[in-house]
Amino acid sequence: MEIGKGDGASSEEYIVLRRGLVQVCHRNESGAWKCCVTLTKNLHFDKYYNYVVLGMLLCLVSSLVALSRLLMEIESFYLEKLIVCPELAKNDFYITGESYAGHYIPAFAARVHRGNKAEDGIHINLKGSAIGNGLTDPAIQYKAYPDYALDMGLIKKTDYSLINKLVPVCEFAIKLCGNFASEMASSLLYDHSLHIYLEFPNFKELIFTPHSAFYIIRFSLKNIIARAGGINYYDIRKKCEGSLCYDFSNMETFLNKKSVRDALGVGNIEFISCSPTMYQAMLVDWMRNLEVGIPALLEDGVKLLVYAGEYDLICNWLGNSRWVHAMQWSGRKEFVASPEVPFVVDGSEAGVLKTHGPLGFLKVHDAGHMVPMDQPKAALEMLKRWTKGSLAEGGKAEKLFAEM
């Protein structure tokens, strides 16, 4: 089961751009075909798995109560599928997703696991979860922004020192769950970031609005992007084009055709790639740490794979690596000490892998935020090996992560 991003972005994006299950094209002015995904990259993940893409509920109101309700809705959805198709009940079950799904995947996996142990309803044969370029532990991940930007040459050392002064402010705001502003946060701003305050006089207003931690992070990200020359924050090798840094116009036009809406049974609801209303509703949830439910899964042998394209800034590999390495569980010491091995696909190194027991971390080469779109062959091979328990095959041990 692939869980959609849930931060206002459409899950149809997964079907078209990331997994290649559908291809949407149009003729340009010269008469040539322009497609969202080229045919040679369309590997059809559904040929290897019973594949379900699940979007988020439009009526979702962000709160802990709503999260609990959402998990129940997701579980009910899947259980209904098992009732209709009982032959699937014995199949291994994996939960996957990318980006903001890094919030929902650990929570849903923990809910399924608790239900199984309590023998509550139909047993779901949960084997593992995979999170790609996800947002799971914001307090650790967002601290990596300046480090990643400096390492990748996006900013200069002077920029790094300036932006890094926001880290203690952000840490404090996250401790407040990012929900409320305070005079203490303003005091920290003056103490640690006076030069930024003088350069951007409206910054004080950001501190005194709701969701302060989110706005501090967005402010830091915008500064990195501006200093790097307007890069695509999903793939730093590219320039940002449009409000979402990618052109989704083909997909929007196709899905808004009356014949398509009728076939999908959505009536006259207009399709948009990203809903501002949904996005704003999720801000309260944004800074919550969802790593907390993962250790119990690992202790019971439920696998977790965290993978990240090396050229993504917004949910970069460094921040993901840090929260995975910092996670407290019985195998942490062995995982941290485990060697890197090359992840080899068709004789070439497609990434760098660390594994111990049920936990794995893969840094994917030549990919940004959307690994299945940028490296579809490597992404599919990753899932196939992981589900078969042979993820580390083909690599030889090398050095430890230098950053650790």
Image (cartoon, rainbow, N blue to C red):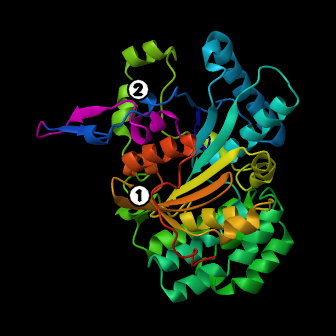
For the question of whether residue 216 can be seen, the reply is: no
Categorize mark 2 by other alpha carbons within 10 Å: few (<14), some (14-19), many (20+): some
Which callout, 1 or 2, points to the residue nearer the camera? 1
How many labels were placed on the picture?
A: 2
Residue at the limit of the structure toward the top, as seen here: 84
Residue at the limit of the structure toward the left, as seen here: 30
**What's the amino acid at mark 2?**
Leu
Quarter of the view holding residue 200: bottom right
**What's the amino acid at mark 1?**
Val
Categorize mark 1 by other alpha carbons within 10 Å: few (<14), some (14-19), many (20+): many
Q: Compared to 113, does 149 lie above or below?
A: below
User: Mark 1 highlights which residue?
Assistant: 344
- The earlier-in-sequence mark between 1 and 2 is 2
Label 2, secondary structure: give it. Answer: helix
Q: Is residue 126 left or right of residue 5?
A: right
x and y percentages locating residue 386 in the rendered image: 55, 45
Magenta-span inclusion, residue 40: no
Residues rendered magenta in the picture: 9-31
